[in-house]
Image: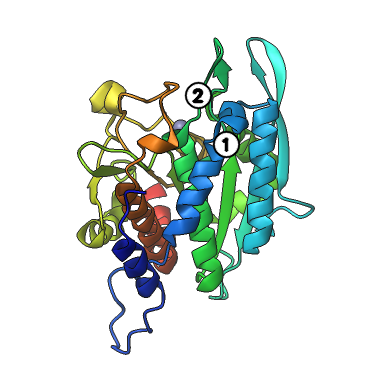
Amino acid sequence: MRMSRCLVLALLVAGCAPHRTQTAEPAVVQPAVVAESLLEDVRILSADDMEGRLIGSAGGAKARAYLLGRLQEIGVAPALGGGFEHPFETKRDGKPVPGVNLIGVVSGTGGSDRALVVMAHYDHVGVRNGQTYNGADDNASGVAALLAIAESLKRRAPLHDVILALVDGEESGLSGARAMIADPVFRPALDRTVLALNFDMLSRSDKNELYASGAFHFPWLRPQLEAIVGSAPVNLKPGHDDPALGKDDWTGQSDHMAFHVAKKPWVYFGVEDHPDYHKPTDDFAAIPQDFFVRSALTVEMAVRAFDRDLETIEGESANAAN
Ligand SMILES: [Zn+2]
């Protein structure tokens, strides 16, 4: 383990800090992600026995069973009534394939019915030519961060409902996120969603950089993003969202695209591609743990900041639409 014991303690202490007594709210609420569970989740999800978590595969089902257990253990409630599982069907190589999203919610205490969606895809590309693609960065890292944030939200409740979507089939045409958005069962949740945050690849950057993408399309999100940039424990950079960038525009490259099509504001957090991207070498052992913990703390700061300002964001989104 490369992360120092010091950092673990620092994070735990930050999580236990007493509430400030000043009248002015801090720009960004102190995050409280616990490093041990974050690293344990990403290690388990990217282990060989998950067989690369391909949609419709036994490995995908095993990952889902683990995630269901974690959601229940953390105390997240199902978001759509019934259970966490949201089944759908897509096609791979012309054949029907079953997928299953897991959708939960941590209730807000602010008396509002507005919601913030936080999502991360748990599928990856499976086994190819006898080689297992473990997808540690892509996207066990985003899923582990989402679970760590769920734990934090259960310790200190958000103001607004935070809908947690662990989606399947991102690697198959963003099929899980698209199915969720299109399903009338999700419609009431979508109608009250003000903003969606997508985590996809949070754990590796040779340059110690994490990107926050989306403000090109939704410039009224810039004040919150700038406040996070100013306090983030990683080098957080806005960008990769201008269509003029061509293939470096990430607008259509992960599940936030489903929200873009539905005209819902989104922010995508992720790193630039690295040499192990979509390779069998995207393994847990290759994750620089210090960077990953800092990255998870950063996205939790974002969840807290956007939760706090959700009414303002909704008002500005409505103004922009008129
Ligand atoms: Zn991904």
Image coords of residue 124 (percent x, y): 53, 28
Q: Which residue is mark 1?
A: 177
Image coords of residue 80 (percent x, y): 71, 52
Would residue 314 appear left or right of 48 to someone viewing this image? left
Q: Residue at x 47, y 37 (%)?
A: 139
Q: Which residue is mark 2?
A: 133
Is residue 304 at least partly visible in the picture?
A: yes
Q: Dot 1, how many residues are within 10 Å of its Cα: few (below 14), some (14-19), or many (20+)? A: many
Q: Residue at x 50, y 43 (%)?
A: 43
Q: Nearer the viewer, residue 319 or 278?
A: 278
Would residue 106 appear left or right of 259 to someone viewing this image? right
Q: Dot 2, how many residues are within 10 Å of its Cα: few (below 14), some (14-19), or many (20+)? A: many
In the displayed structure, 43 sits above or below 170; it is below
Q: Earlier in the sequence, mark 1 or mark 2?
A: 2
Image coords of residue 224 (percent x, y): 30, 60
User: Which amino acid type is shown beneath numbered disc 1?
Assistant: Ala
Q: How is the image coloured?
A: rainbow
Q: Residue at x 40, y 37 (%)?
A: 285
Would residue 127 appear left or right of 219 to someone viewing this image? right
In the displayed structure, 125 sits above or below 8; it is above
Q: Residue 51, located in which quarter of the rendered image?
A: top right
Is residue 169 at least partly visible in the picture?
A: no
User: Which amino acid type is shown beneath numbered disc 2?
Assistant: Tyr
Q: Secondary structure at mark 2?
A: loop
Q: Nearer the viewer, residue 146 or 251?
A: 146
Image coords of residue 36 (percent x, y): 46, 57
